[in-house]
Image (cartoon, rainbow, N blue to C red):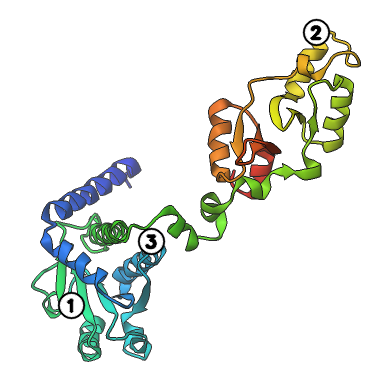
């Protein structure tokens, strides 16, 4: 048996599917704009429907729509015929996914959907199919061939349907002026939600945890403050203004210079070039500042530029952002 060339096979698949997307883009016309306008005017939900592989695509697109400001719900066509169609009202619209355009379960669902009075749209391959002709707006996802060498397993066709569904979701998102804040509301959990909502003030060390000394403080006393607070840093503040910081790195340099820690003022050995961030900023912004400057600590300021805390990379890691 000849050893298969897996990379060659993968490249062939990617080439066929990329050409399917190129064809889809070239054939896109005003029907897509009409579909977007019709959905935007819909007062209810967007119900996606399909069976088989097309059903999986419909389910994914429903999830994408819901997370980008277009409330959606997926119904399996078979389940629709056995009660689930009851969730659909005349204020909703139904978006059908069927590559063949002849899926019996969906065809059997169309008359009950029309009786409800909702709008019905479809993504199908052939525009002359039963489903295409039975819906208010149809967009073709026809492909020249499947990536499957047998031309049987849905591959290029499902890629085309998935891409068109994503294009629809993004077009609706842009029409609704969907903002990052809106996105955060539907993604409250996990790393994504935290990136969009978690602020510096939520995770910084503040109050009694914030290590602070004045510029005239002897280095020995500053070291006690660093040790007591356990953050590896102390802020040097005078009359509510940040003058500098002293870190573990500054301590190493001070020891190398053989300065007397009891007689040396912290102002003489501190770092004056301090990177800061306001407490109202997103914690994700702090990550960008740290990575850009290759540092692991930021002094946090309030809206009046008064130092109020410390944020470490360790805090960001514990929060789950890193």
Q: CA distance from mark 2 to mark 1?
A: 83 Å
Lower position in the chain sequence, tag 3 or tag 1: 3
Q: Secondary structure at mark 3?
A: loop
Residue that protrudes farthest toward the top in the picture: 257
| Residue at 62% over, 43% down | 279
| Residue at 69% over, 40% down | 314
| Residue at 38% over, 61% down | 68
Left or right of 98, for residue 309: right
Task: Say few, some or many: other residues with alpha carbon within 10 Å of mark 2 (under 14 / 14 to 19 / 20 or more).
Answer: few
Q: Secondary structure at mark 2?
A: loop
Lower position in the chain sequence, tag 2 or tag 1: 1
Q: Relative to 301, is 107 above or below?
A: below
Comparing 254 with 123, the one in front is: 254
- Image coordinates of residue 154 in percent, x first then y, are 26, 63
Task: Say few, some or many: other residues with alpha carbon within 10 Å of mark 3 (under 14 / 14 to 19 / 20 or more).
Answer: many
The disc at residue 257 is 2
Task: Say few, some or many: other residues with alpha carbon within 10 Å of mark 1 (under 14 / 14 to 19 / 20 or more).
Answer: some
Which residue has dot 3 on it? 68
- Image coordinates of residue 145 in percent, x first then y, are 17, 57
Residue that protrudes farthest toward the left in the picture: 128
Q: Are marks 3 and 1 in contact (CB under 8 Å)?
A: no
Which residue has dot 1 on it? 102
């Amino acid at each position: 048996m000849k050893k298969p060339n897996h990379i060659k096979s993968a490249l062939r698949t990617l080439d066929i599917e990329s050409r399917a997307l190129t064809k889809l883009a070239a054939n896109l016309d005003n029907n897509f704009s009409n579909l977007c306008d019709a959905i935007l005017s819909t007062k209810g939900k967007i119900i996606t429907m399909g069976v088989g592989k097309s059903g999986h695509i419909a389910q994914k697109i429903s999830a994408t729509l819901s997370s980008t400001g277009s409330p959606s719900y997926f119904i399996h066509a078979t389940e629709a015929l056995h009660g689930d169609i009851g969730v659909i009202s005349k204020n909703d619209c139904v978006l059908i996914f069927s590559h063949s355009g002849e899926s019996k379960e969906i065809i059997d669902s169309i008359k009950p959907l029309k009786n409800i009075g909702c709008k019905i749209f479809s993504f199908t391959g052939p525009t002359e199919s039963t489903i295409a002709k039975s819906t208010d707006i149809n967009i073709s996802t026809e492909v020249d061939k499947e990536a499957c060498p047998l031309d049987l397993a849905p591959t290029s066709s499902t890629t085309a349907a998935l891409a068109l569904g994503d294009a629809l979701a993004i077009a609706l998102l842009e029409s609704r002026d969907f903002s990052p804040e809106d996105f955060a509301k539907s993604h409250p959990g996990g790393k994504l939600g935290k990136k969009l909502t978690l602020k510096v003030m939520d995770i910084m060390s503040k109050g009694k945890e914030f290590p602070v000394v004045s510029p005239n403080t002897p280095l020995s006393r500053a070291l006690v403050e660093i040790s007591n607070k356990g953050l590896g840093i102390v802020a040097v503040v005078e009359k509510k203004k940040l003058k500098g910081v002293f870190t573990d790195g500054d301590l190493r340099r001070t020891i190398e210079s053989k300065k007397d820690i009891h007689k040396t003022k912290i102002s003489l050995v501190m770092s004056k070039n301090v990177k800061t961030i306001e407490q109202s900023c997103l914690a994700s912004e702090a990550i960008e500042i740290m990575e850009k400057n290759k540092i692991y600590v930021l002094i946090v300021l309030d809206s009046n530029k008064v130092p109020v805390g410390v944020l470490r990379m360790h805090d960001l890691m514990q929060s789950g952002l890193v």
